[in-house]
Amino acid sequence: MIKWRKPGPGFGPGDDHLQDEKAMRAIEKEMLHNIHKEIYGKWHFIKTSAAKYAIAASLVLMCSSALFYFKLSVKDKAAMMAVTAKKGNLKTITLPDGSTVWLNSGSTIKFPERFGKTREVQLINGEAYFDVKHDSTSPFIVHYGRLYAQVLGTAFNVKFYKNISDVRLTVTRGRVAVGNKTETFGLLTPDKEMVYDQEKATHQIRTIDAEKVAAWKSSEVNLYGVSFNELVMRLENTYGVHINYSHKENDHLITTIHFSNNNTLSYVLDIIKTIHHLDYVLKGKEVYLAKNENS
């Protein structure tokens, strides 16, 4: 039986090395204060200057040794690495444990230079597909927004964009435990997808073709029931353009669409024109969408 452990609260996008430096300076200040107190607070017990300097030297030596050990401990901590796939490009990463991650266009992931007792990574923003190397002694944990996913060895897709309420995790192989800081939502199996609403803090689990969801890593895009702003963002990331449209008129639109990164932008815009009756004008890197007056 697998016991799922929730990830530690300290992992996140903060600058850990800055906190370590602050802690080290505080220790230095405290130790120097104690040296001063030790020497001058007991001055009346010291008979010769030689004894005074001997005590001071001993305390300085202890202080230096402690600080040296502290600095070694800080240095020994694994450095954090951040990797981003530029817009219009996909990126493949091999993690320290041999697991593989595919990053979708415009996505960023953060992970340590080497793993410890647990293998923890963070999807900062975007979409990533994880093919995790099995290790029964070291859980693999992905942090994304308020949520986490924990596995021992499996394959799954995570889509998390900070400015889009809809967050999704889809399993292609194995089992994935999904939850947040207070509860576990469930144990997902292949072709199961958890959809989480960041605004309402609600979730649902549904059945879907997971291989099609993750097909973006081979340049095939399948979007199922996505919001219009997500559709726009996907086009902007894939083709490196900026799309102008009326949020009031279009944000409520839901889209299911299939296309390839190899298709031209005009080809995809023609599909959207057919689905939502929108006209478009393409000027360089700017796209203008407007409602078709004849619809």
Image (cartoon, grey):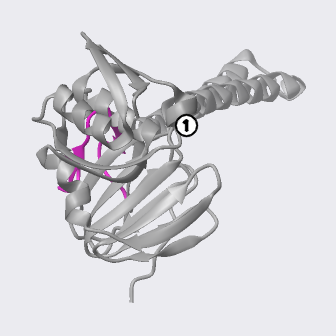
Quarter of the C terminus within the rendering: top left
Q: Relative to residue 54, is residue 134 depicted above or below?
A: below
Q: Is residue 103 magenta?
A: yes
Residue 118 occupies quadrant: bottom left
Q: Visible in this render: residue 78?
A: no
**Of 279 and 169, the residue lying toward us:** 279
Q: Which residue is farthest right?
A: 44
- Which span of residues is magenta-colored? 93-116
Q: Residue at x 46, y 67 (%)?
A: 178
Residue 94 place in picture, x, y as percent? 18, 47
Q: Which residue is mark 1?
A: 66
Instruction: Say which element carries label 1.
Output: helix
Q: Is residue 263 magenta?
A: no
112 left or right of 210? right
The amino acid at mark 1 is Ala
Residue 13 place in picture, x, y as percent? 50, 38
